[in-house]
Amino acid sequence: MFVVMRSGATEAEVIGVKGLILAEGLTPFESTSAGRTLIALVGEIGRRREQLRTALEAMPGVTAVTPISTPYKLVSRELQPEDTVIRVLDAAIGDGSLTVMAGPCSIESRDQLMETVDFVAAHGATVIRGGAFKPRSSPYSFQGLGVEGLRYLAEARQRTGLPVITEVMEPSQVDIVAEYADILQVGTRNMQNFSLLLACGRAGRPVMLKRGFGATIEEWLMAAEYIASAGNPQIILCERGIRTFETSTRNTLDLTAVPLMHHLTHLPVVVDPSHATGKRWLVKPMAIGGVAVGADGIMVEVHPRPDEALSDAEQQLDLEGFESLMTALVAVHEHVKDLHGDLVRVDETPVVTGPER
Ligand code: PEP
Ligand code: MN
Protein backbone atom coordinates (compact mmCIF):
# COMPACT_ATOMS: atom_id res chain seq x y z
CA MET A 1 0.00 0.00 0.00
CA PHE A 2 1.00 3.60 -0.26
CA VAL A 3 0.33 6.79 1.62
CA VAL A 4 -0.86 9.86 -0.26
CA MET A 5 0.20 13.06 1.53
CA ARG A 6 -1.93 16.20 1.19
CA SER A 7 -0.51 18.74 -1.25
CA GLY A 8 1.77 21.05 0.67
CA ALA A 9 2.48 18.47 3.39
CA THR A 10 5.42 19.62 5.51
CA GLU A 11 8.75 17.86 5.68
CA ALA A 12 8.06 17.02 9.33
CA GLU A 13 4.79 15.31 8.33
CA VAL A 14 6.57 13.27 5.68
CA ILE A 15 9.30 12.32 8.15
CA GLY A 16 6.63 11.34 10.68
CA VAL A 17 5.02 8.92 8.23
CA LYS A 18 8.35 7.45 7.19
CA GLY A 19 9.32 7.02 10.84
CA LEU A 20 6.18 5.01 11.54
CA ILE A 21 6.86 2.79 8.51
CA LEU A 22 10.50 2.23 9.55
CA ALA A 23 9.44 1.45 13.11
CA GLU A 24 7.34 -1.41 11.68
CA GLY A 25 10.45 -2.84 10.01
CA LEU A 26 9.22 -1.82 6.53
CA THR A 27 10.90 0.41 3.95
CA PRO A 28 9.32 3.72 2.88
CA PHE A 29 9.82 4.76 -0.78
CA GLU A 30 9.03 8.35 -1.54
CA SER A 31 7.90 9.60 -4.95
CA THR A 32 5.74 12.36 -6.35
CA SER A 33 2.68 12.08 -8.54
CA ALA A 34 0.47 14.96 -9.66
CA GLY A 35 2.36 17.28 -7.32
CA ARG A 36 1.75 15.14 -4.23
CA THR A 37 4.16 13.16 -2.17
CA LEU A 38 3.50 9.43 -2.13
CA ILE A 39 5.15 7.05 0.27
CA ALA A 40 5.05 3.37 -0.65
CA LEU A 41 5.46 0.74 2.08
CA VAL A 42 7.65 -2.09 0.96
CA GLY A 43 8.18 -5.29 2.91
CA GLU A 44 6.15 -8.10 4.40
CA ILE A 45 3.06 -6.39 5.82
CA GLY A 46 1.11 -9.58 6.51
CA ARG A 47 -1.61 -9.36 9.11
CA ARG A 48 -0.68 -5.85 10.24
CA ARG A 49 -2.44 -4.35 7.22
CA GLU A 50 -5.60 -2.95 8.82
CA GLN A 51 -3.92 -1.78 11.98
CA LEU A 52 -1.16 -0.04 9.99
CA ARG A 53 -3.63 1.54 7.67
CA THR A 54 -5.59 3.04 10.56
CA ALA A 55 -2.42 4.32 12.21
CA LEU A 56 -1.18 5.93 8.99
CA GLU A 57 -4.55 7.50 8.19
CA ALA A 58 -4.46 9.21 11.55
CA MET A 59 -1.04 10.80 10.93
CA PRO A 60 -0.89 14.54 10.26
CA GLY A 61 -0.54 15.42 6.57
CA VAL A 62 -2.00 12.12 5.31
CA THR A 63 -4.87 12.29 2.79
CA ALA A 64 -5.33 8.62 2.02
CA VAL A 65 -3.82 5.17 2.37
CA THR A 66 -4.31 3.16 -0.81
CA PRO A 67 -3.73 -0.55 -1.36
CA ILE A 68 -1.68 -1.78 -4.33
CA SER A 69 -3.36 -4.88 -5.69
CA THR A 70 -0.34 -6.33 -7.49
CA PRO A 71 2.66 -8.13 -5.94
CA TYR A 72 5.00 -5.64 -7.60
CA LYS A 73 4.57 -2.27 -5.97
CA LEU A 74 7.21 0.32 -6.90
CA VAL A 75 7.04 -0.41 -10.61
CA SER A 76 3.24 -0.53 -10.78
CA ARG A 77 1.02 1.99 -12.54
CA GLU A 78 -1.18 1.99 -9.47
CA LEU A 79 1.57 3.68 -7.49
CA GLN A 80 2.72 5.96 -10.30
CA PRO A 81 0.28 6.71 -13.11
CA GLU A 82 2.77 8.92 -14.98
CA ASP A 83 5.32 7.34 -17.32
CA THR A 84 8.89 7.10 -16.07
CA VAL A 85 11.25 8.99 -18.35
CA ILE A 86 14.91 8.00 -18.19
CA ARG A 87 17.36 10.73 -19.05
CA VAL A 88 20.92 9.82 -19.80
CA LEU A 89 23.31 12.30 -21.43
CA ASP A 90 21.12 13.98 -24.07
CA ALA A 91 18.88 10.95 -24.59
CA ALA A 92 15.43 10.54 -23.05
CA ILE A 93 13.79 7.11 -22.97
CA GLY A 94 10.04 6.91 -22.40
CA ASP A 95 9.18 10.54 -23.24
CA GLY A 96 7.39 9.72 -26.50
CA SER A 97 10.53 10.01 -28.64
CA LEU A 98 11.89 7.02 -30.57
CA THR A 99 14.75 5.30 -28.77
CA VAL A 100 17.06 3.32 -31.04
CA MET A 101 19.80 1.30 -29.33
CA ALA A 102 22.10 -0.01 -32.03
CA GLY A 103 25.51 -1.61 -32.35
CA PRO A 104 27.18 -4.97 -32.67
CA CYS A 105 26.23 -8.07 -30.75
CA SER A 106 29.85 -8.33 -29.52
CA ILE A 107 32.58 -5.74 -29.57
CA GLU A 108 35.22 -7.61 -31.60
CA SER A 109 37.81 -4.92 -32.21
CA ARG A 110 38.21 -1.16 -31.94
CA ASP A 111 37.84 -0.74 -35.70
CA GLN A 112 34.71 -2.87 -35.92
CA LEU A 113 33.02 -0.89 -33.13
CA MET A 114 34.03 2.57 -34.42
CA GLU A 115 32.95 1.80 -37.98
CA THR A 116 29.57 0.65 -36.68
CA VAL A 117 28.95 3.49 -34.24
CA ASP A 118 29.94 6.21 -36.72
CA PHE A 119 27.34 4.85 -39.11
CA VAL A 120 24.48 4.21 -36.68
CA ALA A 121 25.00 7.55 -34.92
CA ALA A 122 24.81 9.34 -38.27
CA HIS A 123 21.61 7.46 -39.13
CA GLY A 124 19.47 8.04 -36.07
CA ALA A 125 20.69 5.77 -33.25
CA THR A 126 20.13 7.36 -29.84
CA VAL A 127 22.06 4.81 -27.73
CA ILE A 128 25.09 2.70 -28.66
CA ARG A 129 25.06 -1.00 -27.76
CA GLY A 130 27.88 -3.54 -27.78
CA GLY A 131 28.63 -6.66 -25.74
CA ALA A 132 31.92 -6.79 -23.82
CA PHE A 133 31.03 -9.64 -21.46
CA LYS A 134 29.07 -12.14 -23.51
CA PRO A 135 26.74 -14.82 -22.15
CA ARG A 136 27.33 -17.60 -24.70
CA SER A 137 25.52 -20.91 -24.74
CA SER A 138 28.83 -22.68 -25.44
CA PRO A 139 31.96 -22.20 -23.32
CA TYR A 140 33.98 -22.61 -26.54
CA SER A 141 32.38 -19.61 -28.30
CA PHE A 142 33.86 -16.10 -28.26
CA GLN A 143 33.26 -14.71 -24.76
CA GLY A 144 33.81 -11.02 -25.50
CA LEU A 145 36.75 -8.65 -25.03
CA GLY A 146 35.85 -7.86 -21.41
CA VAL A 147 37.36 -4.65 -20.03
CA GLU A 148 39.12 -3.90 -23.32
CA GLY A 149 35.66 -3.83 -24.94
CA LEU A 150 34.39 -1.48 -22.22
CA ARG A 151 37.21 0.93 -23.04
CA TYR A 152 36.25 0.96 -26.71
CA LEU A 153 32.67 1.59 -25.69
CA ALA A 154 33.71 4.63 -23.65
CA GLU A 155 35.61 5.86 -26.71
CA ALA A 156 32.47 5.37 -28.81
CA ARG A 157 30.56 7.58 -26.37
CA GLN A 158 33.23 10.30 -26.71
CA ARG A 159 33.09 10.06 -30.45
CA THR A 160 29.31 10.11 -30.91
CA GLY A 161 28.08 11.92 -27.80
CA LEU A 162 25.59 9.08 -27.34
CA PRO A 163 25.11 7.05 -24.15
CA VAL A 164 26.32 3.45 -24.22
CA ILE A 165 24.71 0.26 -22.93
CA THR A 166 26.36 -3.07 -22.27
CA GLU A 167 25.59 -6.28 -20.45
CA VAL A 168 26.73 -7.09 -16.93
CA MET A 169 26.67 -10.79 -16.16
CA GLU A 170 27.49 -11.04 -12.48
CA PRO A 171 27.48 -8.92 -9.33
CA SER A 172 31.29 -8.74 -9.23
CA GLN A 173 31.29 -7.02 -12.65
CA VAL A 174 28.79 -4.31 -11.76
CA ASP A 175 31.32 -1.73 -10.54
CA ILE A 176 33.61 -2.00 -13.55
CA VAL A 177 30.76 -2.01 -16.06
CA ALA A 178 29.12 0.97 -14.33
CA GLU A 179 32.42 2.82 -14.55
CA TYR A 180 32.33 2.70 -18.37
CA ALA A 181 28.66 2.29 -19.35
CA ASP A 182 25.76 4.73 -19.06
CA ILE A 183 23.12 1.99 -18.92
CA LEU A 184 23.59 -1.52 -17.49
CA GLN A 185 21.97 -4.38 -19.36
CA VAL A 186 20.73 -7.49 -17.58
CA GLY A 187 20.38 -10.28 -20.13
CA THR A 188 17.62 -12.82 -20.58
CA ARG A 189 19.61 -15.59 -18.88
CA ASN A 190 20.04 -13.45 -15.79
CA MET A 191 16.57 -12.00 -15.35
CA GLN A 192 16.09 -13.88 -12.11
CA ASN A 193 19.66 -13.60 -10.86
CA PHE A 194 18.46 -11.78 -7.78
CA SER A 195 21.88 -10.86 -6.40
CA LEU A 196 22.74 -9.31 -9.79
CA LEU A 197 19.45 -7.40 -9.82
CA LEU A 198 20.12 -6.01 -6.34
CA ALA A 199 23.70 -5.08 -7.25
CA CYS A 200 22.43 -3.26 -10.36
CA GLY A 201 19.84 -1.55 -8.20
CA ARG A 202 22.61 -0.13 -6.06
CA ALA A 203 24.87 0.93 -8.93
CA GLY A 204 23.36 4.35 -9.59
CA ARG A 205 22.97 3.80 -13.34
CA PRO A 206 19.81 3.11 -15.34
CA VAL A 207 19.27 -0.60 -15.95
CA MET A 208 17.72 -2.32 -18.96
CA LEU A 209 16.12 -5.57 -17.86
CA LYS A 210 15.58 -8.07 -20.64
CA ARG A 211 12.71 -10.49 -20.28
CA GLY A 212 13.77 -13.98 -19.31
CA PHE A 213 13.10 -16.30 -22.25
CA GLY A 214 10.91 -18.42 -19.99
CA ALA A 215 9.52 -15.67 -17.80
CA THR A 216 5.92 -14.62 -17.36
CA ILE A 217 4.95 -10.97 -17.36
CA GLU A 218 4.58 -11.08 -13.59
CA GLU A 219 7.99 -12.70 -13.05
CA TRP A 220 9.52 -10.01 -15.26
CA LEU A 221 7.84 -7.26 -13.25
CA MET A 222 8.95 -8.85 -9.98
CA ALA A 223 12.52 -8.88 -11.31
CA ALA A 224 12.17 -5.15 -12.06
CA GLU A 225 10.80 -4.71 -8.54
CA TYR A 226 14.05 -6.18 -7.15
CA ILE A 227 16.04 -3.42 -8.89
CA ALA A 228 13.59 -0.73 -7.76
CA SER A 229 13.56 -2.07 -4.20
CA ALA A 230 17.33 -1.61 -4.05
CA GLY A 231 16.77 2.09 -4.63
CA ASN A 232 16.92 2.38 -8.42
CA PRO A 233 13.69 3.31 -10.22
CA GLN A 234 15.53 3.96 -13.52
CA ILE A 235 14.56 0.74 -15.29
CA ILE A 236 13.88 0.02 -18.96
CA LEU A 237 12.11 -3.23 -19.88
CA CYS A 238 13.13 -5.08 -23.05
CA GLU A 239 10.94 -7.70 -24.73
CA ARG A 240 13.40 -9.94 -26.62
CA GLY A 241 11.27 -12.97 -27.37
CA ILE A 242 10.33 -16.01 -25.33
CA ARG A 243 10.83 -19.70 -25.92
CA THR A 244 7.80 -21.51 -27.29
CA PHE A 245 7.23 -24.73 -29.26
CA GLU A 246 8.08 -22.78 -32.44
CA THR A 247 11.49 -23.54 -33.92
CA SER A 248 11.34 -21.49 -37.15
CA THR A 249 12.57 -18.44 -35.28
CA ARG A 250 15.13 -18.17 -32.50
CA ASN A 251 12.39 -17.07 -30.08
CA THR A 252 8.79 -15.92 -30.32
CA LEU A 253 8.41 -12.17 -30.08
CA ASP A 254 5.59 -11.46 -27.65
CA LEU A 255 4.34 -8.12 -28.91
CA THR A 256 1.32 -8.29 -26.60
CA ALA A 257 3.80 -7.67 -23.81
CA VAL A 258 4.30 -4.09 -25.00
CA PRO A 259 0.82 -2.62 -24.43
CA LEU A 260 0.34 -4.98 -21.49
CA MET A 261 3.47 -3.71 -19.79
CA HIS A 262 2.52 -0.13 -20.51
CA HIS A 263 -0.76 -0.87 -18.78
CA LEU A 264 0.75 -2.52 -15.71
CA THR A 265 3.87 -0.42 -15.19
CA HIS A 266 5.11 3.13 -15.67
CA LEU A 267 8.48 1.90 -16.95
CA PRO A 268 9.53 2.35 -20.60
CA VAL A 269 9.45 -0.74 -22.83
CA VAL A 270 11.69 -1.46 -25.81
CA VAL A 271 11.63 -4.36 -28.25
CA ASP A 272 14.67 -6.34 -29.43
CA PRO A 273 13.75 -7.92 -32.79
CA SER A 274 17.30 -9.27 -33.30
CA HIS A 275 17.34 -11.84 -30.50
CA ALA A 276 13.59 -12.37 -30.85
CA THR A 277 13.79 -13.62 -34.43
CA GLY A 278 17.41 -14.67 -34.96
CA LYS A 279 17.00 -13.86 -38.66
CA ARG A 280 18.24 -10.69 -40.33
CA TRP A 281 15.32 -10.34 -42.73
CA LEU A 282 12.76 -10.54 -39.91
CA VAL A 283 14.33 -7.73 -37.90
CA LYS A 284 12.81 -4.86 -39.85
CA PRO A 285 9.18 -6.04 -39.88
CA MET A 286 9.25 -6.92 -36.19
CA ALA A 287 10.93 -3.65 -35.21
CA ILE A 288 8.17 -1.85 -37.09
CA GLY A 289 5.61 -4.02 -35.30
CA GLY A 290 7.12 -3.15 -31.92
CA VAL A 291 6.98 0.57 -32.53
CA ALA A 292 3.48 0.30 -33.98
CA VAL A 293 2.14 -1.30 -30.79
CA GLY A 294 3.65 1.43 -28.67
CA ALA A 295 7.20 0.43 -27.75
CA ASP A 296 9.32 3.34 -26.60
CA GLY A 297 12.06 2.11 -28.89
CA ILE A 298 14.07 -0.81 -30.12
CA MET A 299 17.40 -2.48 -29.53
CA VAL A 300 18.97 -3.84 -32.69
CA GLU A 301 22.24 -5.56 -33.59
CA VAL A 302 24.31 -4.01 -36.39
CA HIS A 303 27.65 -5.17 -37.79
CA PRO A 304 29.59 -3.80 -40.79
CA ARG A 305 30.15 -7.35 -42.11
CA PRO A 306 27.60 -9.57 -40.35
CA ASP A 307 28.78 -12.74 -42.05
CA GLU A 308 32.15 -12.37 -40.34
CA ALA A 309 30.63 -11.65 -36.90
CA LEU A 310 31.99 -13.66 -33.96
CA SER A 311 28.48 -13.95 -32.49
CA ASP A 312 24.91 -13.85 -33.79
CA ALA A 313 26.04 -13.54 -37.43
CA GLU A 314 22.63 -14.52 -38.81
CA GLN A 315 20.65 -11.81 -37.09
CA GLN A 316 22.86 -8.73 -37.27
CA LEU A 317 21.88 -6.06 -39.78
CA ASP A 318 24.53 -4.68 -42.09
CA LEU A 319 24.93 -0.91 -42.30
CA GLU A 320 22.65 -0.57 -45.29
CA GLY A 321 20.03 -2.69 -43.53
CA PHE A 322 20.15 -0.37 -40.54
CA GLU A 323 19.68 2.68 -42.74
CA SER A 324 16.68 1.12 -44.43
CA LEU A 325 15.23 0.10 -41.06
CA MET A 326 15.57 3.64 -39.74
CA THR A 327 13.75 5.17 -42.70
CA ALA A 328 10.80 2.86 -42.13
CA LEU A 329 10.85 3.16 -38.36
CA VAL A 330 10.91 6.94 -38.22
CA ALA A 331 7.90 7.06 -40.56
CA VAL A 332 5.97 4.52 -38.48
CA HIS A 333 6.81 6.29 -35.25
CA GLU A 334 5.66 9.60 -36.71
CA HIS A 335 2.40 7.96 -37.67
CA VAL A 336 1.64 6.22 -34.36
CA LYS A 337 3.18 8.43 -31.72
CA ASP A 338 -0.02 10.34 -31.01
CA LEU A 339 -1.90 7.08 -30.62
CA HIS A 340 0.20 5.93 -27.72
CA GLY A 341 -2.09 7.48 -25.15
CA ASP A 342 -4.86 5.24 -26.51
CA LEU A 343 -2.66 2.16 -26.53
CA VAL A 344 -1.87 2.53 -22.84
CA ARG A 345 -5.10 2.00 -20.96
CA VAL A 346 -4.16 3.80 -17.77
CA ASP A 347 -7.82 4.63 -17.28
CA GLU A 348 -8.64 0.97 -16.63
CA THR A 349 -7.95 -0.72 -13.33
CA PRO A 350 -4.78 -2.77 -13.83
CA VAL A 351 -5.22 -6.50 -14.05
CA VAL A 352 -5.25 -8.10 -10.62
CA THR A 353 -3.28 -11.31 -10.84
CA GLY A 354 -4.10 -12.76 -7.47
CA PRO A 355 -4.95 -11.87 -3.89
CA GLU A 356 -3.18 -8.89 -2.46
CA ARG A 357 0.25 -9.94 -1.22
C1 PEP B 1 22.41 -9.11 -26.00
O1 PEP B 1 21.57 -8.21 -26.18
O2 PEP B 1 23.62 -8.95 -26.19
C2 PEP B 1 21.96 -10.43 -25.52
C3 PEP B 1 22.82 -11.38 -25.17
O3 PEP B 1 20.63 -10.56 -25.50
P1 PEP B 1 19.68 -11.59 -24.66
O4 PEP B 1 20.11 -11.47 -23.23
O5 PEP B 1 18.31 -11.05 -24.93
O6 PEP B 1 19.90 -12.94 -25.26
MN1 MN C 1 23.51 -11.03 -29.72
Image (tube, rainbow, N blue to C red):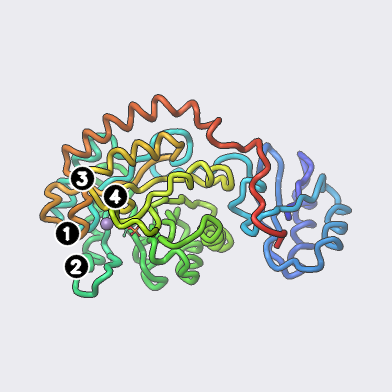
Instruction: Identify which residue, 285 or 178, lies in the foreground.
Output: 285
Distance from disc 1 to disc 2, alpha carbons, whole Å, reads 9 Å
Give coordinates of residue 332: x percent, y percent.
36, 29
Quickly name the residue at label 3: 317
Residue type at the position of mark 2: Phe
Residue name at image x 50 percent, y 63 percent: 202
Distance from disc 3 to disc 2, alpha carbons, whole Å, reads 19 Å
Quickly name the residue at label 1: 108
Query: Judging from the image, what secondary structure is the residue with disc 2 in?
Result: loop
Residue type at the position of mark 4: Ser
Residue name at image x 36 percent, y 67 percent: 169
- Residue 143 visible in rendering: yes
Residue type at the position of mark 3: Leu
Residue type at the position of mark 1: Glu
Quickly name the residue at label 4: 274
The answer to whether mark 3 and mark 2 are in CB contact below 8 A is: no
Q: Does ligand 2 reach within 8 Å of label 4's beta carbon?
A: yes
- Residue 232 visible in rendering: no
The numbered mark, 3 or 2, whose residue comes first in the sequence reads 2
Query: Judging from the image, what secondary structure is the residue with disc 4 in?
Result: helix
Which mark, residue 142?
2
Residue name at image x 29 percent, y 42 percent: 161
Distance from disc 4 to disc 2, alpha carbons, whole Å, reads 19 Å
The answer to whether mark 3 and mark 4 are in CB contact below 8 A is: yes
Distance from disc 1 to disc 3, alpha carbons, whole Å, reads 16 Å
Instruction: Identify which residue, 320 or 125, lies in the foreground.
Output: 320
Residue 123 to residue 86: above or below: above
The N terminus sits in image quarter: bottom right
Q: Residues within 10 Å of mark 3 (few under 14, many from 20)?
A: many
